[in-house]
Image (tube, helix red, strand yellow):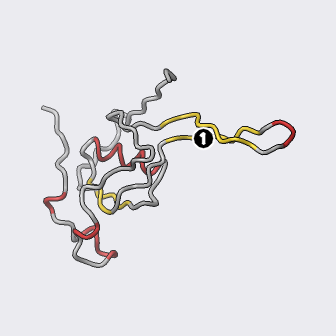
Amino acid sequence: KSGAVDTFSSLADGIELDAPLVIFVNGNTASAAEVLTAALKENNRATVVGEKTFGKGVVQTIRSLSNDNGGVAVTIQRYETPLRNNINKLGIEVDAPPTALDCDNADAAVCIPSSAFKKPVTES
């Protein structure tokens, strides 16, 4: 309920890439892939194309029961997006559905209309 919060940020001396970035997702995109997708989307760094993601926003562990009578899955952590949104059982909505692409999957990245790309937020 009031557990510790871990926040991770990029290094200040990293290389900045301002090229358009597209992430392709579907209902099988889960867990750490959703965390990365949410971070890039909510920071206006990537356009997310495809289908809503799976919605796995928790970390669980198995606790053994006494006398080897099985175990129980216990939730020990919850993922939140950079904007503190909960994705568990909700998934991440896409910016453009796959039907917006009018080309073969192999060429999908080059056929996304330029209007679908978000512009990075710049500080003045």
Q: Position of residue 24 (x, y in %)?
A: 35, 61
Using residue 72 as the reference point, say whether residue 89 is left or right of it.
left
Position of 38 relative to 77 (above/below):
below
- Which residue is painted at 49% across and 21% down in the image? 2
Check the image and name the residue furthest to the top: 2
Q: Quadrant of the C terminus?
A: top left
Amino acid at circle 1: Gln
- Which residue is painted at 47% across and 53% down in the image? 30
Using residue 24 as the reference point, say whether residue 1 is left or right of it.
right
Check the image and name the residue furthest to the bottom: 104
Position of 37 relative to 106 (above/below):
above
The crowding category of the residue bearing disc 1, from other C-alpha atoms within 10 Å (few below 14, some 14 to 19, many at least 20), is: few
- Which residue is painted at 37% across and 36% down in the image? 10
Q: Position of residue 39 (x, y in %)?
A: 35, 43
Check the image and name the residue furthest to the right: 67
Position of 8 relative to 46 (above/below):
above
Using residue 57 as the reference point, say whether residue 13 is left or right of it.
left
Q: For this rendering, which residue is in front, 14 or 102?
A: 102
**Quadrant assignment, res 116:** bottom left
Q: Position of residue 7 (x, y in %)?
A: 43, 30
Q: For this rendering, which residue is in front, 100 or 111?
A: 100
Q: For this rendering, which residue is in front, 39 or 59?
A: 59
Q: Position of residue 74 (x, y in %)?
A: 63, 37
Question: Dot 1 corresponds to which residue?
Answer: 60
- Which residue is painted at 72% across and 38% down in the image? 63
Using residue 120 as the reference point, say whether residue 58 is left or right of it.
right
**Quadrant assignment, res 104:** bottom left
Q: How many marks?
A: 1
Which structural element holds mark 1?
strand
